[in-house]
Amino acid sequence: PAYAQSAKAFVTQSGFYTNGPKTIILTHAKANEPFGIIDLDTRQNVFAGRLTSGRKSPTADITGYAAEFSALKKNGYYAIQYKGQNLDSFYIQPAVYHALSAGAIKSYYYQRASMPLLPQYAGKWHRGAGHPDTIVYIHPSALGDTHPAGARIKSPGGWYDAGDYNKYIVNAGITMGTLLTAYEDFSGYYDTLSLNIPESGNGIPDIINEIIYNLRWMLTMQDTDGGVFTKCTNAAFDGMVMPGITKDKRYVVKKSTAATLDFAAVTAQAARIMKAMPGLRQLSDSCLTAANKAWQWAIKNPKLYYDQDAMNKQYQPAITTGGYGDKKLEDEWFWAAAELYITTRDTFFLNYAQQYWQPVYDLQGWPNVGMMGCYTLLKHATAVALPESFVSQLKQRLWQLADEYLAVQNKTAFATVMGYNAANYSWGSNAVAANQAMLLIKTYLLNGQTKYVHAALTNLEYLTGRNATEYSFITGFGKKTPMYPHHRPSAADGITEPVPGFLVGGPNRHAAAQDKCVYNSLVPELQYTDAACSFASNEIAINWNAPLVYITGAMESIKYQ
Ligand code: 9MR
């Protein structure tokens, strides 16, 4: 049909930095044809260029032609013109990711369990408290010889994991590690970033205030013996209702090695960062004690995997909420040892870190935390005089991954690092894009080469509209954004706009088979639907937002402007 033949522009909906790289992708265009940029205020043509040759998507029948106009460095409101048509409009201005950075952090406030969200902080998304978690039963899988049957603990606070109302330590682990790392890398930016949350103005940076809300919950999840319960959960997912409506029993479930090591890593890192902050000395000390206890428990219980199906054959009630089961724990050992070493400088932990380092650790994600340890060790390598040979092994792996990403960024239709193979489009693919960008920024922070920041920006632009679906994947941020995320409060609150600041999971090549929603396309990079039923492509989750926080904060700190 004729409409399919007309040219289309794919452009970040967040705008371009004054002095940053500027690329818009056109489809249904031709190589080497002219394009122009027009200033929409003055109606002047301000830039003329030619499209690149076409790049075909490795996973779809899409060919993209790049319109590159980085030389245009004047703030303003513009449109891209092709064959006499204005295809799309955009801004060039400073601080284009500042609002998104703040919004992405603020989303964690909206995920707070056990407290009401008041209108002065939450605006029209104010709501009552849900899930007090002051009475939480120790599930039979977790009683062991530590607790009598029917025992209960308190485990209030923390963030809901995602679109559901449960709280999982493994996923909180990578989330908290990423957020703490954002602060460690860009404290100058975050120190003055105010989020209008209840703690604002207390002398602590708001990103840390928000992190503390979840940290205090995590501390409640440590059992007296040092082991950490895997999750605080209902037996089955709540319906699509507001928090506070359901009153199902809550459980803490089986202590596991993965949860305990992730907990050790996070509490060790938090102890280091919070130590010097006003009024946080005690919290820092408690975190370090907790980290050490967790480590010791893991040493005694190195193979307690969380296998929900196996557990359900043995214990009642069956638990059917998120599993986050992980059977490969070398990377968790490595991450925990790395954080404990940098915080304590005790070579005992350095030995473990060296023992558990493997040069195959891949992009970070909830089951893969090896690179988290790598980042921390490299960041502090000089301060702790990390052995040179170890440093070079760590760098080699990081460089290798970063250079793989650089090598593919021009092999995708949208000239983004994201999308070079179908496997990128897994459940939570948007976090793959965000985590790749974080890895690239980490590389830049270590070697100062701006090509890595440019590559990271391609993925941030992917997330904000430069992708096959044309969505800016963050609720409330962009011109075309998800309106029906799989997020219980957004679905149930009766407010048209979803709760803002959340990155949805994104295209997933198995989504239709997994959630059985209706999809317009099964092509990997288009298998996304903005429907509340779509937990496999349109859910939100704390671990997906965290690298978005990292990369937007990074861009605002590195400053193209
Ligand atoms: O992010 C998780 C993804 O990697 C898994 O493939 C998927 C299925 O097990 O689960 C995702 O995590 C979900 C969790 O289990 C429960 N809360 C919502 C999470 C995001 O969909």
Image: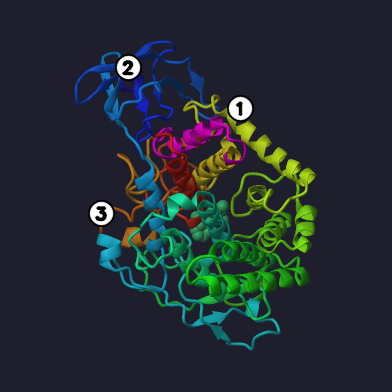
Question: Which residue is found at the position 22% from the left and 18% from the top?
Answer: 44
Question: Label 1, label 2: how many angstroms apart (C-alpha)?
Answer: 29 Å
Q: Which residue is mark 2?
A: 47
Residue type highlighted by circle 2: Phe
Left or right: where does residue 389 sit relative to residue 286?
A: right
Sooner in the amino-acid sequence: mark 1 or mark 3: 1
User: Which amino acid type corresponds to the residue marked 1 in the rendered image?
Assistant: Ala
Q: Looking at the picture, does residue 43 appear above or below residue 287?
A: above
Q: Residues within 10 Å of mark 2 (few under 14, many from 20)?
A: some
Q: Give residue 35's position: percent from left, percent from top.
A: 34, 15
Quarter of the image where the C terminus is located: top left
Coordinates of residue 557 in the picture (x, y in percent): 45, 43
Dot 1 corresponds to which residue?
407
Query: Quadrant of the rendered structure where residue 263 is?
Result: bottom right
**Looking at this view, is 82 or 422 the one in front?**
82
User: Residue 449 lies in magenta, yes or no?
Assistant: yes
Q: Which type of secondary structure does the marked residue at label 1 adopt? A: helix
Circle 3 residue: 496
Closer mark to the observer between disc 1 and disc 2: 2
Q: Amino acid at mark 3?
A: Thr
* Mark 1 / mark 2, whichever is N-terminal: 2
Query: Callout 3: few (<14), some (14-19), or many (20+) C-alpha neighbours within 10 Å?
Result: few
Which residues are drawn in magenta? 445-469
Depth order, front residue of 59/521? 59
Magenta span: predominant SS is helix
Gap in angstroms between the C-alphas marked 2 and 3: 39 Å
Which quadrant of the figure has residue 466? Answer: top left
Question: Residue at (51%, 72%) from the top-left corner?
Answer: 216
